[in-house]
Image (cartoon, rainbow, N blue to C red):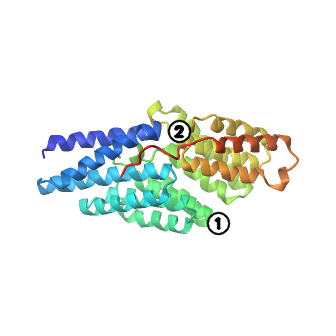
Amino acid sequence: MDDTLLEQIDADIARLAADYVSKPVPELFHDIGTLRRGVFDLLRGRQHPYQTSHLYLQAGRLCGLATHVALDLGQYTAAATHSRTAWRCAESARHNGLRAWIRSVQSLISYWQQDHRQAAELARAGLPYADSGTIAARLLGLEARAAAALGDSAGALRAVEAAEAARSAVAAVDLPGVFTFPEAKQWTYAGTALLALGSRRHVNRAIEASSRAITLYESAPQQEQSSGDLLAARLDLASAHLAHGDLDGVQEKLSVVLDAAPDRRTASISSRLRALSTRLAQPAYAGSPVVLRLRENVREACARPALTNPPELPQ
């Protein structure tokens, strides 16, 4: 064991985390699993105590990436297992930044399992560890989405505002990719939270937030453009236009999502598509040929294979 090897592993983790934002998951999960197994193999050997601590930090980050893989595949039980291992590694490394980040991913797992109360609690539980970087803004954005899903309008709006304040106070630099929380992603989360609040005023604010997220992502370098967040923001915009009865707007935003490659459609995107399909089936739209066509398009998209069954999930 030597420090050069630790530096190489750090570089590999940073590369995988950065690639995760813009590359399809099937291109990455094998490398994530292989590197993670290699780090745990090193922990079974002999090293200086400071190297052991660093290896636990690396193992925790790689378990966090494996959690993201399982989460994007909709394999929430596996994601929860990976996240618990990541937490134990963060505890062994005594690293607050990783502790806070793992709580944010656990909040995501609960959110997509429809346990919004636990999602909010996990986001709040991460805040005491958020001592640098953008993680406080991430946790507050997650809390806002969960609170909005619970119907807690005051709590959601308070968290949205607190996330903006937290971003203005950011000084330290995060690791790249999924370990950081860009402003565009913050606006994506805010759009989802505001849309869930339902009133016309909040829906209008959601349109502004989601539109801003898309603008920021599209103006960023290609490798920083999160395909998942771009699809999520467009689906939120489609839902917002539907709330206003603007079927042309729904069709425009939805067409981009339906044209996306199947390997870009994560479990959360599929979940949003199904939710939109349910809203399109409401009696108010029963006689609309445009809505019938949109429902059929969404049904066909949901029937096509998506990112759900890779040949190998990291163990």
Crowding around mark 2 (Cα neighbors within 10 Å: few <14, some 14 to 19, many 20+) is some
> Helix, strand or loop at disc 1?
loop
Crowding around mark 1 (Cα neighbors within 10 Å: few <14, some 14 to 19, many 20+) is some
* Residue at far front of view: 311
Please identify, in this view, whether the residue under mark 2 or under mark 1 is nearer the observer: 2
Residue 56 visible here: yes
Q: Nearer the viewer, residue 234 or 302?
A: 302
Q: Are marks 2 and 1 in contact (CB under 8 Å)?
A: no
Q: Which residue is mark 1?
A: 151
Q: Nearer the viewer, residue 218 or 40?
A: 40
What residue is shown at x 74% (from left), y 53% (from top)? 279
- Amino acid type indicated by mark 1: Gly
Q: Position of residue 12 (x, y in %)?
A: 29, 39
> Helix, strand or loop at disc 2?
helix
- Amino acid type indicated by mark 2: Asp
Viewed as shown, does residue 168 lie left or right of 269?
Answer: left
Q: Position of residue 232 (x, y in %)?
A: 59, 45
Viewed as shown, does residue 93 lie left or right of 108?
Answer: left
Q: Which mark is residue 263?
A: 2
Viewed as shown, does residue 105 lie left or right of 263?
Answer: left
Disc 2 to disc 1, C-alpha distance: 33 Å
Q: Position of residue 13 (x, y in %)?
A: 31, 43
Q: Nearer the viewer, residue 116 or 166?
A: 116
